[in-house]
Amino acid sequence: MLNPLRRLLLASAIVFFQGDPSEAFSTQSASLSRLISPALPISKNFRSFSSTRSSESSECSSPDNQTSALKKELLTNIKNLRSLQERDGDFSIDFGVKGGELDKKSRAPQKVDFYSISDDVGNAADEVMGVASQLAECNPTNEPTIYFGDKTNGGNSPLDGTWRLLFTTAADATFSKSSKRGAATAKNVVDASKGRITNVIDFATLEDGTEPLLKQLNVVIGAKSAGKSRVELQFKYAKAVLTKFFFWKRQWSVYIPVPAPFITRSIVFFSRILKFGRQGEVKVPPKAYFDVLYLDEDLRIHKTGEDNLFVQASPAWEEAQPFLS
């Protein structure tokens, strides 16, 4: 029972920020693939979201008025996208390679292809990303990472606090009731003083009213500033909240450590020695990070190292609350 569950949790732990924390971590994800069914197609030509413009080169003529209008337009477009997904269908993405979550060769998180549902859904997703791109040009926060990791002033960091998911292109952060892993809501809790980020996934109650075996997944990540807008990530461990202990209904937790960078680098080093003189290259797992494109007290938009876009809202943003449940 625990071995498949352990693989499932390891495969889940890259949700939100992408990156491949270790080869061992990716191998666990791949080993789960035989337990799951194929998903909808994943785009290989999905248009990239540009983050090359910085706040210093903002093209906003009237930032306050323009961002307010763009934020309203963003929520309108997300509402339209969700309505079309209700009409035309939703993704069915599960864990691992065969589940459509990870790329077969790189084991990196895939991008979802909204056009695989319908042209209307694809166009609606493009409209969401278009507004997000405009907001990135009007970013009111010149240094999103200020005070991040500062034990004294971390509470003043604009990144500090809870952020809930509104929209993403990342397959590993996409949940639906039509998939085996089920529907879920996701949030991102940032403790800037400690330099820690916790991704929290709450899985929805099943259609028959019973609780799922995996009720909640927490992925704890060490984070540090790597520039005015970039945050580098180091995955620490995953905590799974389960609703059954074998045959007994009892809530309990399982803690699963993620291999540390030293272990990962050692694996890569010895793999290179073993492959010396042979064809093929041993790839070093890339660093996990995200770049903040837009940030204010209500809204956060960031792009990961895998080029996936995330749009997140503060629970205090009243206009966005209907989209956060």
Image: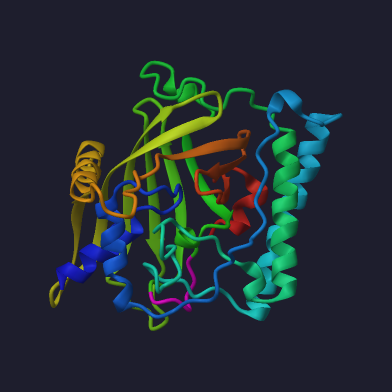
User: Which residue is drawn at the image coordinates 39% and 60% (left, top)?
Assistant: 202
Write down the quadrant of residue 104 in the picture.
Answer: bottom left
User: Which residue is drawn at the image coordinates 37% and 67% (left, top)?
Assistant: 96
User: Which residue is drawn at the image coordinates 48% and 79% (left, top)?
Assistant: 178
Q: Which residue sits furthest bottom?
A: 208
Write down the quadrant of residue 99 in the picture.
Answer: bottom left
In the image shown, does 98 or 271 lie closer to the viewer? 271
User: Where the N terminus falls, by quadrant?
Assistant: bottom left
Q: What is the chief secondary structure element of the magenta stretch?
A: loop
Residue 241 versus residue 284 in the image, above or below: below
The picture places residue 290, in percent across and down from the top left corner, at 50, 39
Task: Determine whether, in the image, residue 26 is placed left or right of residue 271.
Answer: right
In the image shown, does 237 or 249 lie closer to the viewer? 237
Q: How is the image coloured?
A: rainbow
Q: Which residue sits furthest right?
A: 61
The picture places residue 278, in percent across and down from the top left corner, at 27, 53
Question: Start and end of the magenta stretch?
Answer: 175-180
Q: Is residue 211 visible?
A: no
Count the marks: how many?
A: 0
Residue 87 versus residue 113 in the image, above or below: below
- Whether residue 179 is in magenta: the answer is yes
Task: Determine whether, in the image, residue 194 is placed left or right of residue 121.
Answer: left
Q: Is residue 218 visible?
A: yes
The picture places residue 78, in percent across and down from the top left corner, at 68, 59
In the image shown, does 18 or 67 lie closer to the viewer? 18
In the image shown, does 17 or 191 lie closer to the viewer? 17
User: Which residue is drawn at the image coordinates 69% and 52% (left, top)?
Assistant: 129
Q: Which residue sits furthest front?
A: 277
- Whether residue 264 is in magenta: the answer is no
